[in-house]
Image: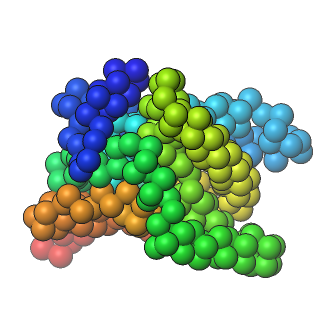
Amino acid sequence: MGTVATAAAATAGEGARTPSTAAISLGLGVAVVSSLVNGSTFVLQKKGIVRAKRRGTSYLTDIVWWAGTIAMAVGQIGNFLAYTAVPTVLVTPLGALGVPFGSILASYLLKEKLNILGKLGCLLSCAGSVVLIIHSPKSESVTTQAELEEKLTNPVFVGYLCIVLLMLLLLIFWIAPAHGPTNIMVYISICSLLGSFTVPSTKGIGLAAQDIFHNNPSSQRALCLCLVLLAVLGCSIIIQFRYINKALECFDSSVFGAIYYVVFTTLVLLASAILFREWSNVGLVDFLGMACGFTTVSVGIVLIQVFKEFNFNIGEMNKSNMKTD
């Protein structure tokens, strides 16, 4: 972590910078591990909620639920480290790896079905993630505190945040109380819209932290900026945590995790594109490659979840062909 921050500070300046191979490898490794850890959180928390309901107690008293909560914290810390090392558009889509891992784990812990189409979906999700890694941008357009402050006060980004805040207020205070328990998209929309704050805040904290311990006039401004971003990040995570658990009480963990990934990733990439302009360094070929990779991941997730109740296996297919012959 210290090596990455030092390298980032040393290469900071005007224009984009390209992280070293070691930094990219470290960020990728941490992102992959974090996605797998995050993939287990919904399953463990759902298992804890089910166990608590059977006993007639609160899920706050269940050790499995707490294991999922701790896993979520570890995964978020891992994401923070990854965001400080490589571009957001590279880290966020890798969360797809947590979906097949969570589905496999749910098939054992929650006895949820995973048929041949689900296994194919797992393979497609992993393949799409590899395509995303290959074609993602390797340079960052925001490398210093001054550039970060300029981006945060950009009228386009401020306008986007105002729209997000308005939608969150509408969802939390009017729509969620009436339709949240029956419509999965309500809770997913709240958690995903909050990603517009959590991911840019995490990335911004990593940039501001580079100047905090330097003996120069900008260190005080960096400290204030870091504290503000920490407060925003903390509030966003707490609200997300509340509505994730509300969703897990009402809906299937695998279905929630899959839809949440697609919506969350789309909104985070949108917020990052507006704030950090990381897409400005992506050529047409890489853009099409990332679009194909994200589409492949999304198709894989649909196969995992939409057809999970469909009874289909190779043995039955062979029997059907034999009867036809």
Residue found 35% across the figure and 49% down from its top: 142
Image position, residue 156 (x, y; %): 46, 73
Q: Residue 115's x, y, as percent?
A: 38, 55
> Please, is residue 279 above or below residue 215 in the view?
below
Closer to us: 231 or 186: 231
- The total number of labels drawn is 0
What residue is at 48 percent from the left and 53 percent from the top?
A: 149
Q: Give the left or right position of residue 104, taking residue 170 as reference.
A: left
Residue 217: give x, y in percent of width and height: 52, 34
Query: Looking at the image, which residue is at 67% across and 76% down?
Result: 166
Residue drawn at x 76%, y 41% as measured from the top left: 51
Image quarter in which the N terminus is found: top left
Answer yes or no: is residue 300 visible.
no
Assign the C terminus to one quadrant of the image: bottom left
- Is 199 or 52 nearer to us in this picture? 199
Q: Quadrant of residue 44?
A: top right
